[in-house]
Image (tube, grey):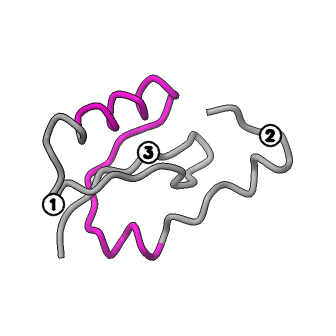
Amino acid sequence: MGDSYIGRKVCGCVVAATSISGQNPTEVANDVADFIRSGLTIEKVTSEYVRLNFKGCPHDKQGKFEA
């Protein structure tokens, strides 16, 4: 098991993730930078957390939230 960074929208939904384990640090940094530019809040979590919580955002379909 490893760790990941997630991007969370204002509504609390996890909409982006990148694995820290086994990835080139530059790629991880680029992914996290993209998350930040998209207005997401960054958190470091376990990969298990990502598997359980990365489901997209139902609010997008309702047009309630941008970031």
Q: Residue at x 74, y 57 (%)?
A: 58
Q: Residues within 10 Å of mark 1 (few under 14, many from 20)?
A: few
- Tell me the residue that label 2 is attached to: 64
Looking at the rendered structure, which numbered label has been put on residue 21? 1
The answer to if 35 sits in the magenta stretch is yes
- Tell me the residue that label 3 is attached to: 7
Farthest-out residue, right = 62
65 vs 48, nearest the viewer: 48
Q: Which residues are magenta?
A: 29-52
Q: Residues within 10 Å of mark 2 (few under 14, many from 20)?
A: few
Q: Is residue 30 left or right of residue 10?
A: left
Name the dominant secondary structure of the magenta segment.
Answer: helix
Between circles 1 and 3, the one closer to the viewer is 1
Task: Give the amino acid at mark 2.
Answer: Lys
Quarter of the figure with residue 33? top left
| Quadrant occupied by the N terminus | bottom left
- Where disc 1 sits, the SS reads loop
Q: CA distance from mark 3 to mark 2?
A: 18 Å
Q: Residue at x 36, y 71 (%)?
A: 49
First reached walking from the N terminus: tag 1 or tag 2: 1
Q: Position of residue 55 (x, y in %)?
A: 58, 65
Between circles 1 and 2, the one closer to the viewer is 1
User: Does 12 appear above or below 53?
Assistant: above
23 vs 49, nearest the viewer: 23
Q: CA distance from mark 1 to mark 3?
A: 17 Å
First reached walking from the N terminus: tag 3 or tag 2: 3
First reached walking from the N terminus: tag 1 or tag 3: 3
User: Does 23 appear above or below 50?
Assistant: above
Q: Residue at x 66, y 54 (%)?
A: 57
- Where disc 3 sits, the SS reads strand
- Where disc 2 sits, the SS reads loop
